[in-house]
Image (cartoon, coloured by chain):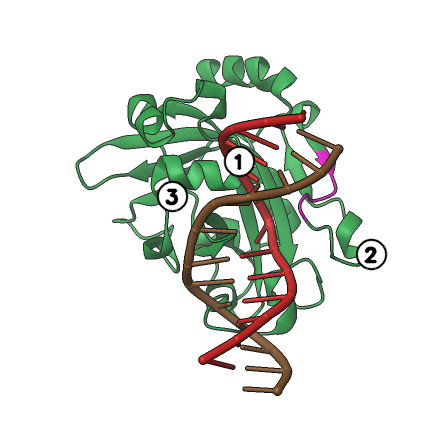
Chain colours: A green, B red, C brown
Amino acid sequence: MFLRLDRAFYARSTERVARELLGQRLVRLEPDGSRLTGLIVETEAYIGTEDLGCHARAGRTDRNASMWGPPGHAYVYFTYGMHWMLNFVTEDEGRPAAVLLRATLPLEGLEIMRLRRSARPDPELTDGPAKLCRALQIDRRFDGHDLCSSDSRLFVEQRPQAPRDFVTIGPRVGLNKVPEPWKSMPWRYRIPSTMMESLLEEERSR
DNA sequence: AGCACGATTAACT
DNA sequence: GTTAATCGTGCTC
């Protein structure tokens, strides 16, 4: 058993939360008892109404209301007519900010994920924000879900964070119509595939 | 009531 | 490299 990340972890600067989530273990417990997990290997920070790449830019709406809520909760939204996206709310209640979970390295529950992902190759099971929601069956039911309550079925297990050498930082992706400087802010954090083997070795030795 | 758009993905050429 | 898929959401009329 490992401790779950607590609310204090999420109630900090969004960049720090996004960076420090790398290497930690995302856990989804299903109603039938299945345990689906993976190491978080890619995140992005979306930070407040001033960030014109963030959904909060146009103010509070029914859709993005979770971002204004307390930290340590999920913000899950639907886009492109078919995809769900999973975020973790950060900073203080009343300030809309969140970390988008863009990719994990699957560890447990691979067979279930393969079924949901049409038997795609394992490296493609959860290597995109909509892919991981599909594999973990995350949808609107998880919008506002508390990641820190003891009975939560979606949370992050506390681990040593990924070594700095493993982390690449760069601009967020998919923001083509977003004006500068927001489009180019270096708020994407990831562990390149070339580092995955090293990360797994670290994981085994923990 | 109508409409433009999207923090993507998969399947193309 | 390009593009279709597909529809909830928020905005305008």
What residue is shown at x 65% (from left), y 24% (from top)? Answer: A192
Numbered tag placed on residue A128 in the rendering: 1
What residue is shown at x 51% (from left), y 41% (from top)? Answer: A129
Range shown magenta: A169-174
Q: Secondary structure at mark 2?
A: loop
What residue is shown at x 79% (from left), y 48% (from top)? Answer: A184
Please check the rendered image and state whether residue A170 is part of the magenta-colored stretch, yes or no: yes
Spatial CA distance of label 2 from label 3 is 34 Å
Give the residue at mark 2. Answer: A180
Residue situated in front as seen by the camera: A183 or A43: A183
Q: Secondary structure at mark 1?
A: loop
Do discs 2 and 3 belong to a common subunit? yes
Numbered tag placed on residue A98 in the rendering: none
Give the residue at mark 3. Answer: A155
Spatial CA distance of label 2 from label 1 is 24 Å
**Given the image, what chain letter belongs to the residue carrying mark 2?**
A
Determine whether C10 is above or below A173 in the image.
below
Quadrant of the rendered structure where residue A113 is?
top left
Q: Earlier in the sequence, mark 3 or mark 1?
A: 1
Determine whether B13 is above or below C4 in the image.
above
- Residue C12 screen position, x and y as percent: 64, 82
Q: Is residue A146 visible?
A: no
Residue situated in front as seen by the camera: A113 or A204: A113
Hey, what amino acid is under mark 1? Answer: Gly
Is residue A64 found left or right of A183 in the rendered image?
left
